[in-house]
Every structure is written in C-alpha cells, then in structure tokens.
C-alpha cells in the first residue's frame, strides 16, 4: 500500500494539513497502478499469436494490425506507471530526507528492490532457453521466444534509471518545477526532430531517459497537489484539447498513431499523451476514491500491489511458456491452432486470457519470495552508484546482444552483483515490505 507523504510546501499551498481525505485520495494511485498492471498482462496475452505451419511453429504479434493504432490510445498505460512512480518516489524521498536518510541509501534501496527479483527470473530464463536448445527446438524458434520474453524488460532498466535519479530530479523540481519539465520536453522534441530529419533512428533511444524522466516529473506535480488546484473546468477542457493537438500532430507530422510504436523509441507525442492522462486521472480521482472504499477492491489492489514487480517481470515468460504448451498440444493433434484473427481465433480469446491471468498469478505467488526486505542499504556512495549502473547495464545487455541462454545467465550474475552492492547481502526468503518501497510497474 502506498502512503502519501505531503511536503510542507504542498500542504501549505493546499491551505490545510494532510488528513484522511489525502490518504484516501492517495489510494487511487494504488488502484491506477494495479489496474494498469492487469491491463498490461491482458494486452501482452492478446499479443501472443501462435500458429503451426508445415515449416514448424510461428510466433507472431497478434496486435500488429491496422486497427490497433486507434485502440492503442485507450490501452497505452505506461505513462501512468511512471506518473505513479514519480508520485510515490517523491513522497518516499521527502520522507526519507526528513528523517535524515541520504540519497545514497534511498538509491540503494531502490536498486535492491528492483534487481533482486530479477536474479531468479534471468536464471529461469537461462535454464528454459538452454533446455529448448538441448531438446532440438529450431534455433529461430528459440530466438523468437527469447525476443518475446525480453520485450517488456526495457521497463526494468529505464525505471531503475528514473528512480536512481529521484533525489536529483526532486531537487530540480523543488527549485524550478516548470523550467525542469519544459527543458525535458524541449530536449525530447529536439531528439525527435533530429531523428525525423536525418533518419538516424539510434538517437531516438536517448528519449528512453528524457521522455520517461519528464513523465516522472508529472508525478511530482501530482504529489505536490498542483494538478488538483487547477480549476476543474480548466482540466476538463485541457485534456480533450491536448488530445486533439496530438491528433493534429499525427496527421501533419511523421509521428504515427500507434501509441505503442511511439514508445519504441519514446517520443514527444508520448510525453504529451502522459500529460493528457494526468489531467484525466485528476478528473477521475473522486470516482476512483469511491471505488477504493469497497473492501473487496481494496484487498485486490493491495494483493496486486504487494507483488507488482514480480507480476511484471514474470508475466511474459509465463505467456510464452503457455504458448509453447499450445504448440506441443497442436503438434500432437490435441488442439487446433486457428488462423490469426479468424472467428475461430477470437472465440476462445476470453478463455485464453483467463488461463493466462491464473497462470501469471500462480507464478507470482511462487516467485514473490525473491522480493526481499532491504534492512541495511549501502551507505557508500560509490557502491550505490555502481549498483545502479550495473543494474541498468544488465538490462541494456539484453537489448544490445539479444536474450539467449548465455545472455540470461550473464544477466542473472549482473543482477546479483547489483543487488549485493546495493543491499545487505544474500537474498531473504521472507517478504517484508515497507509502504514506502511500493513500486509501480507495467
């Protein structure tokens, strides 16, 4: 459960001390985070397209279709994850700072909480891919499985970078909030302009840092109560106006309509989309707060929130494993895998999604033991900084080299090194979670 920490400046600006209403309002961030995570799992499950041809099994992205572009505006939730991350991190860092903690220990806690669960994941992936290769599965099928499993892992590296920079970015926000946000937005736009003008695609990946840091800053504004103080009518008009502006950009510039394509690499369009989502979130807060008064909703949100990183890290491996089981069943004529997007493919989708959710939740329960408490984070600046760099490098290796079993094994070692540098030694089996350590995930 996320606990709100309102800094003195935000409290005075609001004209009243934080109370029960603030805590309830903050619970809507937990609801948004958990609902977004469920949507991400369902979306990735829908992406899994498997058919069996005479040449062997074929794994495809079932959502690579023309109609998904407009739909993506409704299901692109990644900006909300980073907004929630900024909201939570701002409060956690300010509370830690007020109690005498340093940026070194704050970053060390974040690194340990993010990287420790990844050790077991990479080890299992290494064993799985090595087993497929040893069993004689075609190399291209093994490579495709590794690629699909790796796709969501970008978030781990980028979110770790954003969280490691929270103390510095909060300091900038407290000194010049609008200038900081405007500078990030300007840099993101300049990078897009260079990419579009020159065709130099690689420069676009600089926006992995710039765009998501901007969206995290939006979470700082929300944590300060700034958005809530904007008149309701202004927000109600501003959100559709901003979305209309994005539509015009898509129609008149090289930006594409697919909001997931705008995530790879991130673009200015996605950053502005995050701002529109923040306005819509602020408008929906009262209704979300009422939902959170329902005990069943609150228990569900808390259950998912306590395992959010585990669910995110493991869900794609589970989905690929289920797809592999389907291929084996089809090869033994136990089931028939229909043509993608045919009526026979769409009809069992609800059953497939339900099966995927149950399997992910079961694995999340089993794997959650790898999320340790961080009781003695590193107090040495070079260890904390090195831990963050090694953790980010661990994920970068996946996308530079590709996810094969040797790469996964190396990443398990790098994740273990990052966790050891950041934390208090070997992993603990028991899960003890502090509210301030709750982490939003896609």
Image (cartoon, rainbow, N blue to C red):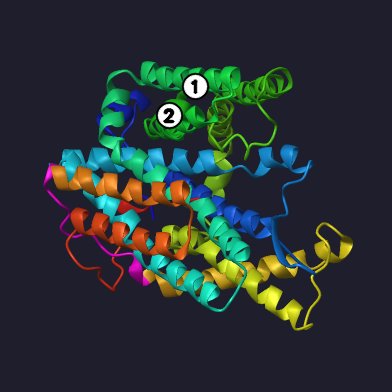
Residue position for label 2: 210
- Please tell me which residue is depicted at 52% across the width and 38% down the height of the picture: 79
| Percent coordinates x, y for residue 148 in the rendering | 58, 57
Q: Earlier in the sequence, mark 2 or mark 1?
A: 1
Answer whether residue 242 is visible to the viewer in this image: yes
Query: Are the residues flagged by discs 2 and 1 in contact, CB closer than 8 Å?
Result: yes
| Percent coordinates x, y for residue 219 in the rendering | 42, 34
Asked if the magenta segment contains residue 196, the reply would be no
Query: How far is disc 2 from disc 1 in space, using C-alphas?
Result: 9 Å
Q: Which residues are magenta?
A: 369-381
| 56 or 119, nearer to the observer | 56
When the figure is inspected, residue 297 is found, relative to residue 181, above or below; the finding is below
Q: Which mark, by number, is residue 33?
A: none
Q: Is residue 100 left or right of residue 330?
A: left
- Please tell me which residue is depicted at 46% across the width and 59% down the height of the picture: 313
Q: Which numbered mark, 2 or 1, is in the foreground of this view?
A: 1
Residue position for label 1: 191
| 108 or 407, nearer to the observer | 407
Q: Determine whether the residue tagged by mark 2 lies in a helix, strand or loop.
A: helix
The answer to which quarter of the image holds residue 53 is bottom right
- Please tell me which residue is depicted at 32% across the width and 37% down the height of the picture: 90
| 170 or 339, nearer to the observer | 339
């Amino acid at each position: 459960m996320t606990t709100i920490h309102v800094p003195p400046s935000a409290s005075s600006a609001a004209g009243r001390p934080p109370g029960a209403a603030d805590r309830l309002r903050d619970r809507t961030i937990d609801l948004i985070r958990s609902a977004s995570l469920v949507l991400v799992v369902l979306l990735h499950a829908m992406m899994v397209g498997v058919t069996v041809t005479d040449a062997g099994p074929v794994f495809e992205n079932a959502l690579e279709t023309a109609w998904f572009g407009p739909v993506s505006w409704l299901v692109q939730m990644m900006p909300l994850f980073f907004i929630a991350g900024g909201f939570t991190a701002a409060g956690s860092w300010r509370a830690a700072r007020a109690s005498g903690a340093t940026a070194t220990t704050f970053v060390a806690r974040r690194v340990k909480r993010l990287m420790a669960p990844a050790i077991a994941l990479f080890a299992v992936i290494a064993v799985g891919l090595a087993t497929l290769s040893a069993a004689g599965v075609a190399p291209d099928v093994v490579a495709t499985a590794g690629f699909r499993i790796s796709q969501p892992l970008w978030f781990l590296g980028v979110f770790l970078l954003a969280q490691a920079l929270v103390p510095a970015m909060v300091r900038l926000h407290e000194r010049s909030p609008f200038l900081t946000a405007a500078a990030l937005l300007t840099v993101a736009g300049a990078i897009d302009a260079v990419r579009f003008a020159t065709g130099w695609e690689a420069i676009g990946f600089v926006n992995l840092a710039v765009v998501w840091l901007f969206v995290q800053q939006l979470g700082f504004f929300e944590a300060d109560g700034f958005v809530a103080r904007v008149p309701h009518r202004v927000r109600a008009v501003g959100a559709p106006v901003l979305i209309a502006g994005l539509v015009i950009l898509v129609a008149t510039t090289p930006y594409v309509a697919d909001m997931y394509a705008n995530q790879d690499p991130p673009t200015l369009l996605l950053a502005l989309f995050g701002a529109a989502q923040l306005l819509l979130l602020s408008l929906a807060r009262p209704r979300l707060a009422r939902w959170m008064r329902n005990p069943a909703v609150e228990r569900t949100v808390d259950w998912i929130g306590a395992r959010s990183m585990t669910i995110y890290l493991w869900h794609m491996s589970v989905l690929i494993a289920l797809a592999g089981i389907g291929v084996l069943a089809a090869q033994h004529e136990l089931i028939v895998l229909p043509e993608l997007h045919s009526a026979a493919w769409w009809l069992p989708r609800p059953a497939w999604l339900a099966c995927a959710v149950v399997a992910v939740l079961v694995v999340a329960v089993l794997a959650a033991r790898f999320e340790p408490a961080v009781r003695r984070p590193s107090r040495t600046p070079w260890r904390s900084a090195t831990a963050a760099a090694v953790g980010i490098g661990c994920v970068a290796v996946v996308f530079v080299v590709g996810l094969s079993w040797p790469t996964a094994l190396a990443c398990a070692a790098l994740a273990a090194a990052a966790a050891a540098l950041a934390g208090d030694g070997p992993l603990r089996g028991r899960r003890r979670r502090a509210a301030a350590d709750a982490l939003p995930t896609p």
